[in-house]
Amino acid sequence: MSIAVAVVGAETPGNVGTIARAMKNFGLSDLYLVDPPDLDPDGEAYGFAGQAREDVLPNATETTLDALVERFHTVGTTAVTNEDARKHVRYPFKTPAELADSLAGVETETCVVFGRERVGLTNDELAHLDEIVSIPASAEYPVLNLGQAATVVLYELRDRTVEATQHPDAIERASQREIEGLHGQFAALLAAINHPKGKRDKAERLFRRVVGRAHLTPREARTLRGIFRRAGDFAEPPDGDER
Amino acid sequence: MSIAVAVVGAETPGNVGTIARAMKNFGLSDLYLVDPPDLDPDGEAYGFAGQAREDVLPNATETTLDALVERFHTVGTTAVTNEDARKHVRYPFKTPAELADSLAGVETETCVVFGRERVGLTNDELAHLDEIVSIPASAEYPVLNLGQAATVVLYELRDRTVEATQHPDAIERASQREIEGLHGQFAALLAAINHPKGKRDKAERLFRRVVGRAHLTPREARTLRGIFRRAGDFAEPPDGDER
């Protein structure tokens, strides 16, 4: 599935650059501009685009909203939704996460459409688009800046657009054998420091809960075990019947 | 639970303003600045802050990283993680969504710490922080702009910080009675237009699937039903044994 981005009537070149950068960060490349501002190669659009100044931004296509509606499944973005079904230009709507879920497994050419800095997309423009997406934000101040709104929506769509992230597949976790080895060493330490016998079981259970929640890496388990061994070897507690 | 935000060594006032705006959009208010740039009330920080120029930005506190570490559960942000457990300054890490989940139900004062535009937080700074968060992005270009990275992280934390969003609680859905009424009207329309009798069941099933996936609002169900009724009333198909 491919997802394109369109920006309608942006006034600030910097916002177009910010959107281009977010596109590259989240694996998108097709940018369409309707009534764009002048994008001077030495100006803010290219200044804000990061590495997208090399491809996404110079390859952007100037077009019309009608041409986009004809070609794509269009999704309009707005901070201002309608409250109920009596007005249906901005209702119903999906959140960005719901949009991402709903596009999973659907073979479509989708275009997410962002509007102007101050007024967003007009009702007339939204009326032509296929569905509406709106970012949940604080009721006191739900209007995100254009570039920030685009960043959030493209972030949510990343599972559809990013082939491989910069992250390793999963966090390495110590094997259960290594974890049990650490607990054995902890018990040995309690004995070596002459921790009161009646309290050792409780202390071991407490430490098991801490380690259980933290999901140690192999190195963390090994390092802690080594430290406990050394602490036990060097312990010279006062003699007593507890030892 | 309260969540604060700290920005360490930002060079661009505009990014500080962008972060302040995202904070206000997602219900946060406590901003800490370590080695901030000059924030001229007529400059870019205030220009980019939107309504946060009224409170979040002017109320920001200048402090040190040590003071933050002492007071808060600190979460450092970085695009560049380590690959495995042999290096543990940037490993293990959580994604922003995992961070949000892990903070649910924990009573803590947390501070999310963002670093410099070009180099982020240094290894020495990250070493002092309690945990690491990293935004999954394209392996080809995973480095988000500072303001955009903060926007994504604060967006993911919204369930912890936003009391009420601008959205209605749930999308109004037509009652099943209204939906069945629509299907009854659709069946009547098929009869009125003399749709081939042998194909009517199939057409009704097809329409049931479309409506079933779309989750109509009450108004949508009512409007379509009215249109089908009118279309049936006005239908004058050629007579035939199918009618």
Image: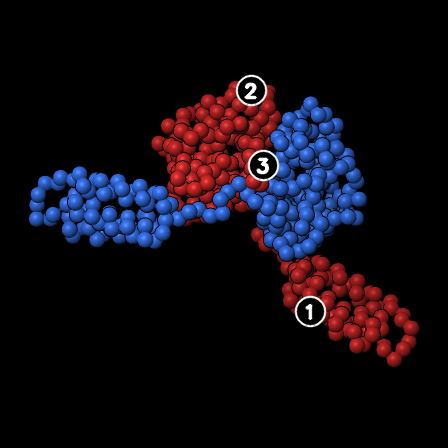
Chain colours: A blue, B red
Nearer the observer, disc 3 or disc 1?
Answer: 3
- Residue drawn at (75%, 64%) of the image: B225
- Residue drawn at (49%, 44%) of the image: A168
Give the labeled residue for mark 3: B141
Give the labeled residue for mark 2: B40
* Quadrant in which the C terminus of chain B is drawn: bottom right
Residue A31, labelled with which disc? none
Disc tally is 3
Give the labeled residue for mark 1: B180
Residue A105 is at least partly visible in this image: yes
Few, some or many residues within 10 Å of mark 2 (<14, 14–19, 20+): few
Q: CA distance from mark 2 to mark 1?
A: 62 Å
Name the side, left or right, on which B236 lies relative to B153.
right
Q: Name the kind of residue labelled 3 in the image.
A: Tyr
Q: Are marks 2 and 3 on the same chain?
A: yes
| Mark closest to the chain's N terminus, 3 or 1 | 3
Q: Name the kind of residue labelled 1 in the image.
A: Glu
A103 is higher (above) or lower (below) than B132? below
- Residue drawn at (65%, 33%) of the image: A52
B175 is higher (above) or lower (below) than A3? below
Q: CA distance from mark 2 to mark 3?
A: 32 Å
Few, some or many residues within 10 Å of mark 1 (<14, 14–19, 20+): some
- Counting from the top left corner in percent of width and height, residue B109 is at 40, 38
Q: Secondary structure at mark 3?
A: loop
Q: CA distance from mark 3 to mark 1?
A: 51 Å
- Counting from the top left corner in percent of width and height, residue B147 is at 56, 32
- Counting from the top left corner in percent of width and height, residue B45 is at 57, 25
The numbered mark 2 sits on a residue in which chain? B
Nearer the observer, disc 2 or disc 3?
Answer: 3
| Mark closest to the chain's N terminus, 2 or 1 | 2
Q: Name the kind of residue labelled 2 in the image.
A: Asp
The numbered mark 3 sits on a residue in which chain? B
